[in-house]
């Protein structure tokens, strides 16, 4: 499909929860309005936010062209809210964006349009240089350490294993036929399973170099809570996620070799100390990796 023709259309879909995303939506609405012949809509769905001030602040986006803000009272989870947006969208191509992302290219939407013939296209994300030097925020340090894995070349090497929901375009018919698994009510791994599912049904994922900026980092305590929640999700869906988690594979090998007791003992003896360090002012990535293995072994051993 040619870019800038009257037949070009796009639904931009943004799920949000307790996050003000007015700046993001304004940038998307501004670029969309500047593209000749583009029919577009921006749908922002609030998934039962508990912060009334955030919900009120996001009302500002309703003044932007082609933008609709949908406030839902009940939190249905990361998968269900995206499926809801796909059903609500009116156009045949869907561009999903996480609400904490930032547009860093004036041609972000334009870069997607030539790829509308492909079933699914992922643009990736990056951390701009000015956000790469913090030593006290664990999430920031972790994401910076993984930047190489966000390059287009890296993602294209194993396209289904490196699928992320933060920035991707999909044909609406595919999303309706293969929705995200709504059993995922809590944080983590819904996108990993979706990538595996798409591979199993033979749907190709195409990766391009069209990143959004990642610049909102939660506190260390909140990130650790999300880490624990994600690991519990990994354990709950361990059968479905076979082959798509190195931590799961390592834990299974340790269990097979009857060595899982080692990280379990470490967690019992030093888990609280590790967590205190990781929620402090100078957390280390090495301690974070140790904690993840030990906490998951603790969960795995209980099963």
Image: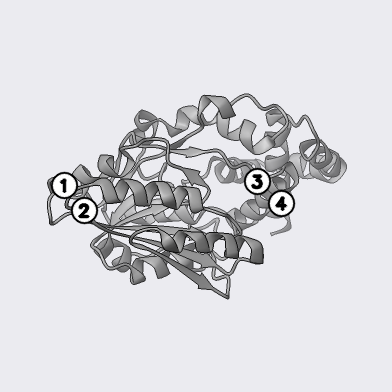
Viewer-proximal residue among 75 and 130: 130
Q: Establish if 37 lies above or below 49.
A: above
Q: Position of residue 93 (x, y in %)?
A: 26, 58
Q: Residue at label 4?
A: 225
Q: Earlier in the sequence, mark 3 or mark 1?
A: 1
Q: Are marks 3 and 4 in contact (CB under 8 Å)?
A: no
Q: Secondary structure at mark 3?
A: helix
Q: Nearer the viewer, mark 3 or mark 4?
A: 4
Q: Residue at label 2?
A: 38
Q: Earlier in the sequence, mark 3 or mark 4?
A: 4
Q: Residue at label 1?
A: 4
Q: Establish if 73 lies above or below 21.
A: below
Q: Earlier in the sequence, mark 2 or mark 4?
A: 2
Gap between marks 3 and 2 measured at Cα: 54 Å
Point 46% across, 59% down: residue: 61
Q: Earlier in the sequence, mark 3 or mark 2?
A: 2
Is residue 122 in view? yes
Gap between marks 3 and 4 measured at Cα: 25 Å
């Amino acid at each position: 499909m040619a870019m800038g023709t009257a037949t070009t259309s796009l639904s931009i879909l943004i799920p949000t929860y307790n996050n003000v995303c007015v700046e993001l939506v304004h940038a998307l609405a501004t670029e969309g309005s500047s593209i000749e012949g583009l029919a577009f809509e921006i749908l922002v769905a609030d998934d039962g936010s508990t912060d009334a001030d955030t919900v009120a602040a996001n009302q500002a986006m309703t003044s932007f062209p082609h933008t609709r803000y949908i406030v839902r009272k009940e939190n249905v989870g990361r998968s269900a809210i995206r499926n809801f947006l796909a059903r609500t969208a009116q156009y045949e191509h869907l561009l999903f964006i996480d609400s904490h992302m930032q547009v860093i290219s004036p041609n972000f939407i334009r870069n997607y349009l030539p790829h509308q013939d492909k079933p699914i296209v992922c643009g990736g994300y990056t951390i701009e240089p000015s956000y790469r030097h913090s030593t006290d925020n664990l999430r920031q340090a972790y994401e910076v350490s993984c930047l190489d894995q966000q390059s287009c070349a890296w993602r294209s090497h194993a396209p289904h294993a490196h699928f992320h929901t933060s920035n991707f375009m999909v044909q609406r018919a595919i999303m309706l036929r293969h929705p995200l698994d709504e059993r995922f009510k809590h944080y983590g791994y819904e996108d990993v399973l979706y990538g595996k599912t798409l591979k199993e049904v033979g749907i190709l994922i195409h990766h391009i170099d069209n990143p959004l900026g990642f610049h909102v980092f939660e506190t260390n305590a909140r990130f650790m809570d999300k880490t624990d929640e994600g690991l519990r999700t990994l354990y709950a869906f361990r059968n479905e996620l076979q082959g798509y988690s190195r931590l799961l594979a390592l834990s299974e090998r340790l269990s097979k070799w009857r060595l899982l007791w080692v990280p379990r003992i470490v967690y019992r003896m030093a888990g609280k100390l590790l967590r205190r360090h990781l929620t402090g002012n100078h957390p280390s990535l090495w301690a974070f990796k140790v904690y993840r293995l030990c906490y998951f072994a603790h969960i795995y051993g209980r099963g």
